[in-house]
Each structure stands twice: as C-alpha cells, then as structure tokens.
Image (cartoon, rainbow, N blue to C red):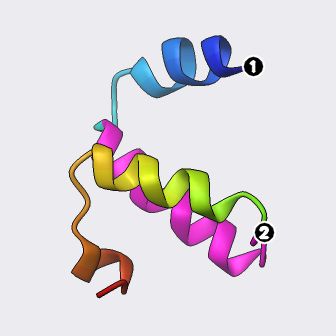
C-alpha cells in the first residue's frame, strides 16, 4: 500500500507533497479519522508543513 500511495499517487504532477499533505490532514480532520492522523501529521511535517499551519504548537 505504501508503494502505491507514496511512490505513485503522491508523485503525480499537479500538487506538491506539501500541498497533498495539507489536503490529506484537512480531510482526515473533517472526517474525524483520528487513527490515521498521527502518521499523516508526521508526514506533513516531513513535507514542509509547519506546526503553526497544522495548528500544533
């Protein structure tokens, strides 16, 4: 699954990994998918999203 997600989907043109992370985190929050959030919050930080942008201080 990680190969498909991060090697294929996340590398498609159109959005940067940073922007994809923002969209993913926003979607997970709006859907209340708390089990998946920790992983994607960490990935967002790796992709250049700041703690302030994530609302985490």
- Crowding at label 2, few (<14), some or many (≥20) Cα neighbours within 10 Å? few
Residue 49 appears left or right of 44: left
Q: For this view, does 38 lie left or right of residue 55? A: right
11 is within the stretch colored magenta: no
Q: Is residue 34 above or below residue 57?
A: above
Give how far across and how far down residue 47 sits, in percent: 29, 44
The quadrant in which residue 46 appears is: top left
Whether residue 22 is in magenta: the answer is yes
Question: Distance between the Cα atoms at labels 1 and 2?
Answer: 18 Å
- Magenta span: 17-34
Element type where label 1 sits in the image = loop
Query: Which residue in the protein does label 2 denote?
Result: 33
Image coordinates for residue 36, horizontal then vertical, percent? 72, 57
* Dominant secondary structure, magenta: helix
- 2 left or right of 18 in image: right
Quadrant assignment, res 28: bottom right
Q: SS of the residue at dot 2?
A: loop
Image mark for residue 1? 1
């Amino acid at each position: 699954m990680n190969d498909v997600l991060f090697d294929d989907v996340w590398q498609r043109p159109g959005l940067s990994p940073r922007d994809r992370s923002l969209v993913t985190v926003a979607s997970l929050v709006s859907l209340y998918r708390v089990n998946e959030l920790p992983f994607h919050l960490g990935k967002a930080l790796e992709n250049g999203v700041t703690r302030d942008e994530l609302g985490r201080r």
